[in-house]
């Protein structure tokens, strides 16, 4: 019996050790699974955060692109309106130049202003539009201005005064004056319209 008892005691001890080993293995497996679940959750959270960040960046880029396009369209529309205003002004100036009663004092001022840029001894040539020739002769006579007169289709409303060698040229037309004022007027028009 002693052998049987010994066998039984050994089997019981082996059984206890087996159970202890299995318990320990289960505990370790649970720890490994728990740790794996935590790591998986952490990785999932990290990947979701990265995906969310990428989506937000993509959305921000798309919004910026849309904003740029809207600003571009606004600036184009703004420029179009400003150019329409300048076009209207040019038409108004053209209408003034065709009304000789309104245009004569303006033409006289343009001529006197241009003359002030030259010394009295300089021989000058006045170039005007074909339609302004009679007006130019009239103003020259009234103001006692002695210059050569040339009427050209290429000169727009206003005049061009130069020395005979054309080294010094004073362009005093509505167009040249408007172009000179355009940057300043552009800002004023923009602030009024927008």
Image (cartoon, rainbow, N blue to C red):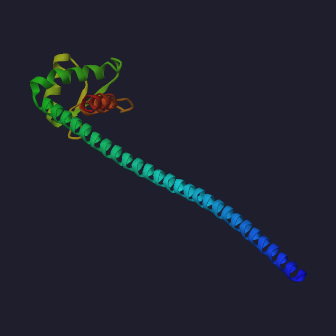
What residue do we see at 25% from left, 39% from top?
Answer: 83
Report the residue at 82% width, 73% height from top: 13
Say which of 16 and 70 sits in front: 16
Residue 8 location (% of width, % of height): 82, 78
Residue 185 at x, y percent in the picture: 29, 29
Is residue 171 in sight in this rendering?
Answer: no
Residue 96: x and y in percent read 14, 29
Locate the C terminus and report the quarter of the image it occupies.
Answer: top left
| For residue 21, above or below residue 136 | below
Residue farthest along the right direction in this orientation = 2
Residue 161 relative to residue 68: left or right = left
Question: Relative to 12, is 116 above or below?
Answer: above
Residue at 72% in and 67% down: 23
Q: From the viewer's perspective, is 87 left or right of 120?
A: left
> In this rendering, does residue 149 appear at all?
yes
- Residue appearing at x 74%, y 71% in the figure: 19
**Is 71 situated above or below 193?**
below
> Which quadrant of the figure contains the N terminus?
bottom right
* Quarter residue 167 falls in: top left
Q: Position of residue 63 (x, y in %)?
A: 40, 48
Quadrant of residue 85 within the rendered picture:
top left
Q: Is residue 143 above or below residue 63?
A: above
Instruction: Return the residue found at the far front.
Output: 1
Compared across the picture, whether 17 is left or right of 72 comes to right
């Amino acid at each position: 019996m002693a052998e049987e008892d010994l066998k039984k005691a050994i089997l019981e001890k082996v059984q206890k050790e087996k159970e202890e080993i299995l318990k320990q293995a289960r505990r370790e497996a649970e720890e490994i699974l728990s740790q794996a679940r935590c790591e998986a959750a952490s990785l999932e959270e990290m990947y979701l955060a990265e995906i969310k960040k990428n989506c937000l960046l993509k959305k921000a880029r798309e919004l910026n692109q849309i904003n740029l396009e809207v600003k571009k369209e606004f600036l184009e529309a703004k420029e179009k309106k400003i150019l329409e205003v300048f076009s209207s002004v040019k038409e108004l100036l053209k209408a003034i130049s065709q009304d000789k009663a309104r245009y004569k004092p303006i033409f006289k001022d343009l001529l006197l202003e241009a003359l002030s840029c030259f010394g009295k001894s300089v021989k000058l040539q006045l170039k005007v539009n074909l339609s302004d020739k009679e007006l130019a002769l009239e103003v020259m006579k009234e103001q006692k201005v002695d210059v050569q007169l040339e009427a050209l289709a290429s000169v727009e409303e206003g005049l061009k005064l130069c020395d005979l060698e054309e080294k010094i040229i004073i362009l005093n037309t509505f167009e040249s004056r408007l172009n000179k004022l355009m940057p300043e007027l552009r800002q004023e028009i923009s602030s009024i319209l927008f």
